Amino acid sequence: MAAIDIKALDPARTVVVATGNPHKVTEIEEILSKSLPHVRFVALGELGDFPDPVEDGADFFENALIKARAAVSETGLPMAIADDSGLCVDALDGAPGIFSARWAGEHGNDDANNDKLERLMSGVPDPRRGAHFHSTVVLVRGDEILRGDGDCEGAIGHERRGDHGFGYDPLFLPADTPGKTMAELTPAEKNAVSHRFHALEDLASRL
């Protein structure tokens, strides 16, 4: 990821995206640029090597707010956006929820997390395999805090399928794409139904 000199940015026209993923920046920019014209979206990872904040919030909103405020504090720029998302399984009382990325003990270990999900869902019949992905997006703009929420409804499959995506995508069957797991969708197809897309649309409506 190319480095950007913070001093070369116009604070009034820059939104820091609390991520190191350039694809996420593109997705956010495509939706929010209509409501925030003449604003440049830059990934936090392009501005330096900053430590990850401790995400100890009680819900998705609090964790997203922690990340957005940390980006403002670390860069000195007044506007930042962050999202927090996770999988909520009906039969598991909403778990893993905010603990989705580290559910099996190691942060970001997708295989271990999916192993745990398959184990806990073993023998659960189809009518009880409902689930949804949730995303909360938070924009900090000076003293103002704006949020957007979105869901992607679906169910947990019986086996992993697909090579796209990450996390629980190989086991999640979106209701909007019958017969396909999230990991079998192209990036464009996923973005059209994803929880983050819906959350960004919700946020855009509030700008």
Image (spheres, rainbow, N blue to C red):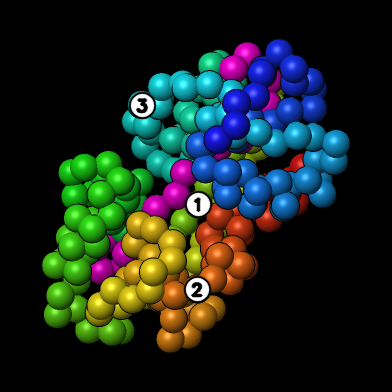
- The x, y position of residue 124, in whole percent, is 19, 78
Mark 2–mark 3 Cα distance, whole angstroms, equals 32 Å
Residue that label 1 marks: 135
Q: Residue at x 31, y 67 (%)?
A: 90
Q: Distance between the residues labelled 1 and 3?
A: 18 Å
Quarter of the C terminus within the rendering: top right
Q: Does the magenta stretch include residue 76?
A: yes
- Residue type pointed to by label 2: Leu
Read off the residue under disc 2. Answer: 185
Left-right relation of 41 to 184: right
Image point (79%, 27%), residue name: 13
- Relative to residue 203, is residue 99 drawn left or right? left
Query: Mark 1: which amino acid?
Result: Ser
Please tell me which of labels 2 and 3 falls first in the chain. 3
Q: Residue 54 carries which label?
A: 3
Mark 3 Cα-neighbour bin, 10 Å: few <14, some 14–19, many ≥20: few
Considering only order in the chain, which callout, 3 or 1, is on the residue closer to the N terminus?
Answer: 3
Helix, strand or loop status at disc 3:
loop
Q: Which of marks 1 and 2 is nearer the N terminus?
A: 1
Residue in the picture at 32% in, 50% down = 100
